[in-house]
Image (cartoon, helix red, strand yellow):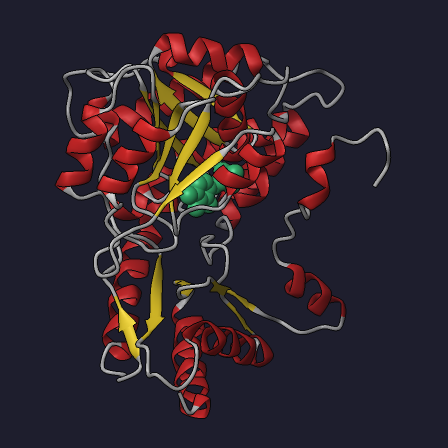
Amino acid sequence: MLPFIRSDLAKFTAYKPHRSSNSAEQVGIQFDRLDTNESPYDLPPEIKEKLAWTFREIIQSNRYPDGGYETLKEAIAQYVNESANHSSCAVTTANISVGNGSDELIRSLLIATCLRGEGSVLVANPTFSMYAILAQTLGIPVVSVGRDESNFEIDLKAAESALEETQNPPIRVVFIVHPNSPTANCLTAQELTWLKSLPEEILVVIDEAYFEFSQTTLVGELAQHPNWVVLRTFSKAFRLAAMRVGYCVGHPDAISILEKVRLPYNLPRFSITAALIALQNHQLLLSSIPETLSERSQLIAALSPHPALEITASDTNFIYLRLKPNGLQSTEVALKSLNQTLKNEGTLIRVLPGGLRITIGTPTENTRTLKRLQIALANLEY
Ligand SMILES: *Cc1c(COP(=O)(O)O)cnc(C)c1O
């Protein structure tokens, strides 16, 4: 370790997504990439054409982008209002901050709330790993609670005690994914009641990365809860993972703080343009969602009868599979072995200590997933 580096960073390893697919590409293997919940579909050619045209004719690459993102924010506000299907509290550009992926916004929220030893964060595992990773790289303590084994509801008693017992620094932020990744479930009424009961000095971050698949949003609650923010991304249903665009919806005061801590020109002009064009064409881009949802039902229906598998409902574009304990082999070892077998066959999925997360791909990919998984399960002798 270099002597000028912060001592607590020695224990971290860099985040390496798609590790195997990148190396495999070099030797020419085509993988079904079902490990990061992206859309299986690239932008349609006519949208790419429009983007290319804009790049050629309009964008001046020697000039800094519009650092205030007003046009993009207006388009986002309009989309958020349209999709919230209630008219009582329309959001405006003052309610929106944009980030280089929602990952940047997560980091900005952490910087704005917990640095200088002022706060810890609470997460309910299993959940999106980036909250804890980003917090730890900033030296922010992470408190974890578990979830119910059957419906993945947050252990609210444990969360309640964590809030009471965590001092020096106290919990300042609660991170929630709605619906959760990797477990694919939406918030229950009980969880929602608990979130509403949290005091105003705790920031509640509701990550709606999968909103377009679940069609349930808490944006309508923001007006009553100035301590809540909603995160969304263009990386999933909008097919723009390569462009890195996310946004945060919240109280104007919270938004102006995010604006203070973000880097100037944090979004490249090309990404701004891509997000704008995506919003202008959202009906076309989101028209693949019904297929994803019906493919999801078919995959769940086909896998559910398997005696070793435990499959729960999904409100997202991925499914979560667990293995029923059989007393012979550790489920964690068996899950890793399934993951490895699938990888050898050319299907990348995400293995977690408690289960497997599989993104819904194209119908062809899903057919392959089913076949490969059934063979892998048969060979597992689990
Ligand atoms: C995929 C995902 C994101 C998206 O992150 P970006 O940085 O916008 O690509 C955010 N939160 C969750 C829970 C996700 O699964």
Q: Is residue 262 above or below residue 175?
A: above
Q: Is residue 96 above or below residue 339?
A: above
**Percent of width and height locating residue 27:** 75, 73
Residue toward you, 382 or 365: 382
Task: Say left or right for 29 vs 240.
Answer: right
Q: Is residue 129 above or below residue 170?
A: below
**How many marks on residues?**
0
On the question of residue 215 being in view, the answer is: no
Q: Is residue 1 above or below residue 98?
A: below
**Percent of width and height locating residue 149:** 26, 60
Q: Quadrant of residue 90?
A: top left
Task: Say left or right for 16 vs 184.
Answer: right
Residue toward you, 92 or 110: 110
**Percent of width and height locating residue 170:** 41, 23
Q: Quadrant of the C terminus?
A: bottom left
Q: Quadrant of the N terminus?
A: top right
User: Which residue: 26% across, 46% down?
Assistant: 155
On the question of residue 125 being in view, the answer is: yes
**Percent of width and height locating residue 200:** 28, 15
